[in-house]
Image (cartoon, rainbow, N blue to C red):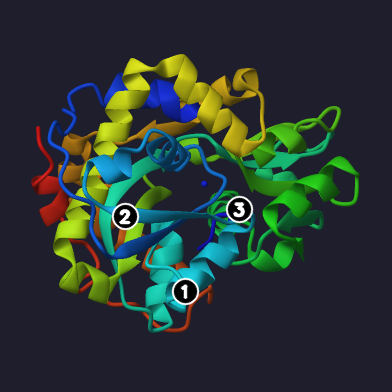
Amino acid sequence: MSRLSARLLAAVMALVALAGGVSACTSAPAASDTKITLGFSAWPGWFPWQVAQEQGLFAKNGVTVELKWFDSYTESLNALSSGVIDANSQTLNDTLVSVSGGAKQTIVLVNDNSTGNDKIIAREGITGVADLKGKKVAVEQGTVDHYLLLLAMAEAKLGPQDIELVNLVTDAAAAAFVAGQVDAVGAFAPFTTTALERPGSRAIATSAEFPGAIPDHLVLKADLVRDRPNEVQALVNTWFETVKWIRDNKDAAVGIMAKRGGVSPEDYRTYDAGTTIFTRQQNLDAFTPGTTPAHLNFQANKIIDFMTGTGLVDNRPSLDGLFDDRFIKAVPE
């Protein structure tokens, strides 16, 4: 599914608290002659890429990266699927949708889990998800917040037919909600801040209620992972060095990421608990096959069951080759 869905100190304090054990790379290998074009969009767990660029950390780790910003998260998904870019920051849900459509993609890093920064926000008078029956709900169809909406509705014993879904990209959906054109909206930070400007509005469901349901990743074209593993390793190493830099330079990092997100540093800090940045160990645990929501294989199959059961995808995607943990394993401890 997508995230602007598509997925700010949200990331910073989580980076500080959760990534303390990661060591920075100390050597400065020669930069590659080839380039990786890396897409990202508005989500707290992906703004650290902006820090990496501004602090020269890609070059320090020997990889040439063109960082490409997408105002529309959905456009970034399409760009990776069509090969316009080499790598993208996207959710597991959306990656599975792309793979079900025939895209060859590989996940090499868990950036974070959404732990509250994806929300279903409703107008005054709507106190729970069950109250959405018969109401107009704006969400970007096929995105991760659409997925969150359907999860919450299923828990409230509602089906897709019980609401009038208004399909809008996430920023437009939030604006439509504030303007009173719809009764509720599915959105992610920073667009949740916009939506909550409507007087009397409140979140009636969040990703915090569905642990592990929305993991966010660094996803690459499968052939690039196969053919250029050294550059992929440098990219993953850069992420963890960026985590360390943010931890050591909190105020400067907040300024960089808030500016990229178009919000104030004060607003950025309000997203703290809603994005849980993964440490190297949490990555290792996630990539290890298991039978709980902490494991990517478990979560992927659960998402696939839901998507096929609700008709969001026609074909059940294969997980063969989707998760590649060798780069996480090789990150300096």
Could you say whether the residue bearing mark 3 is in a helix, strand or loop?
helix
Question: Can you say whether 67 is above or below 228 in the image?
Answer: above
Could you say whether the residue bearing mark 2 is in a helix, strand or loop?
strand
Q: Where is residue 142 drawn, in percent x and y? A: 58, 66
Label ID, residue 149: 3
Tell me how far mark 1 sits from mark 2, CA to CA: 17 Å
x 58%, y 29%: residue: 258
> Which quadrant of the view contains residue 332?
top left
The amino acid marked with disc number 1 is Val
In front: label 3 or label 1: 1
Residue 7 can be seen in this image: yes
Graded by Cα atoms within 10 Å as few (under 14), some (14 to 19) or many (20 or more), the crowding at tag 2 reads many
In this figure, what is the number of numbered marks?
A: 3
Residue under label 2, please give it: 64
Residue under label 1, please give it: 84
Graded by Cα atoms within 10 Å as few (under 14), some (14 to 19) or many (20 or more), the crowding at tag 3 reads many
x 33%, y 20%: residue: 247
Q: Nearer the viewer, residue 108 or 38?
A: 38
Left or right placement of residue 180 versus residue 168 in this view: right
Left or right placement of residue 55 versus residue 320 in this view: right
Q: Where is residue 318 drawn, in percent x and y? A: 27, 77
Q: Nearer the viewer, residue 184 or 113?
A: 113
